[in-house]
Amino acid sequence: MHSDDAGESQARSSLGFPEFIALIAAIMSTQALAVDAMLPALPRIVHELGVPNPNHGQWVVTTYVAGVGLGQLLWGLASDRFGRRPILLIGLALYVTAAVLCGMAESFRALLLWRFVHGLAAACMVLTRSVVRDLYAGRRMARVLSLTYVVFLMVPIIAPTLGALILKVAPWRAVFQVFAAFAGFVGLWAYMRLPETLHPEYRLALAPGKILAAYRAVLWNRIPLCYCLAVMLLFGSLISYVSMMPQIFGSVFHHASWMPTMFALCAGSMGIASLLNSRIVEHYGMRRISHFALMCYLGVTAVHFTVAFMGFESVPSFVVLQSLTMGSFALVAPNFGALAMEPLGAVAGVGASVQGFVTTCGGAVVGSAIGRQFADSTVALTGGALVCGLACLLVVLIGERGRLFHGHPLGRHSDQSSVLETGAADRSVSAAHHRKM
């Protein structure tokens, strides 16, 4: 057996597939927890730190997301050079430190500063996509991503409730202590169980020419770039939704205490859709499922915008239509993510970094632009989601040269194979490309 194939087999068998999925999802969840568990605390933070404009409470979310986006440029490149495992562990240690310092902040400005550092550290979670790409390709990569999303999306269901429970017995600063404790546990788990997955021949020398060639391979590839931009647009609408939820239930529906429960209901549809995707993606393919789900997303957001614009919005209509929107998003996101990473096996770290930077920073800008339009209604949220969906469709059409719903050009087998099964061919092509770099 090829030595690298043996390494991949060891990487898989040492964990086992269920534990691998759980660990990857837990690592990803440290990033999501730092957003969703903060939502109930935003009004209290605004009040206790003397923030004059309540809308500025959204900055606690957007600053963190901006830090995540910028940080990914560092972590992915470092992991392509030094390996996934050590860089991930360093990032988790910095995450713990930043979370503790956020909880000690005495001013809103200091909180935003450390929150940005918190995001920079959380950006190391992008390496989970590199680890998955190291071991899987095609439809099976999409299946693995969907399964991690099932666990990962449980965080939005429980995190706001967790945050609310913490606030009942402790000050808002305790929320950050919970972030630190959870990340410390995940870091210990990864230290004890996660092997190195980077192929030795894929290690990137830190020479300017080779680094530029790696970035060029990511940015000049039409399919990965277009699907990355598509995810960015949808992620922007998701950020606006997360940021505006406290205001929507406080100022529009006048039931702020309902927010965690309603948020959980909407997030639950994402978990169900991700589980469904993991079961059908290997049969129907990433493109067919994601393109169909994008059309559903457009239809639902159009209906929701009409309801909001006509003044018919209510708590039941919001929860039902937003749940359908989130479910459609969950059928799009892992498949678009897999399609964006599929051609980038030799530069998976740089690929995940660049795509993560574009997705999170661009998404933060889009989400912030939508959030600023909030005016005591859901019109800004639903209209922003519809516009993002239409722009996403345009980008996908450009990437696919006007064709939707078609299968993989190389056939069903190659679309669903794993790196272990097609390792020799995949690595020979990638290694040849790497030597040219």
Image (spheres, rainbow, N blue to C red):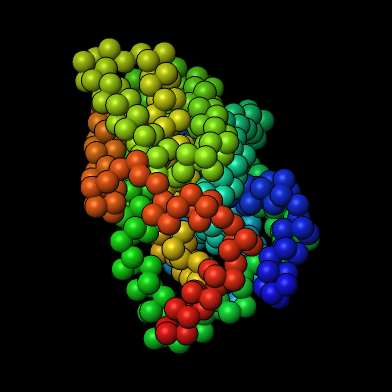
Return the residue nearer the eye: 342 or 403. 403
Residue 65, position as x, y percentages in the image:
43, 51
Return the residue nearer the eye: 77 or 400. 400
Going 39% across and 29% down the picture, which residue do you hit? Answer: 325
Residue 264, position as x, y percentages in the image:
54, 27
Residue 257, position as x, y percentages in the image:
51, 20
Asked whether residue 77 appears in the rendered view, the answer is no
Quarter assignment of residue 275: top right
Q: Quadrant of the C terminus?
A: bottom left
Quarter assignment of residue 210: bottom left
Residue situated furthest left in the rendering: 310
**Up-down relation of residue 437 to residue 235 (above or below):** below
Residue 244, position as x, y percentages in the image:
38, 33
**Up-down relation of residue 377 to residue 219 (above or below):** above
Q: How many marks?
A: 0
Going 35% across and 29% down the picture, which residue do you hit? Answer: 296
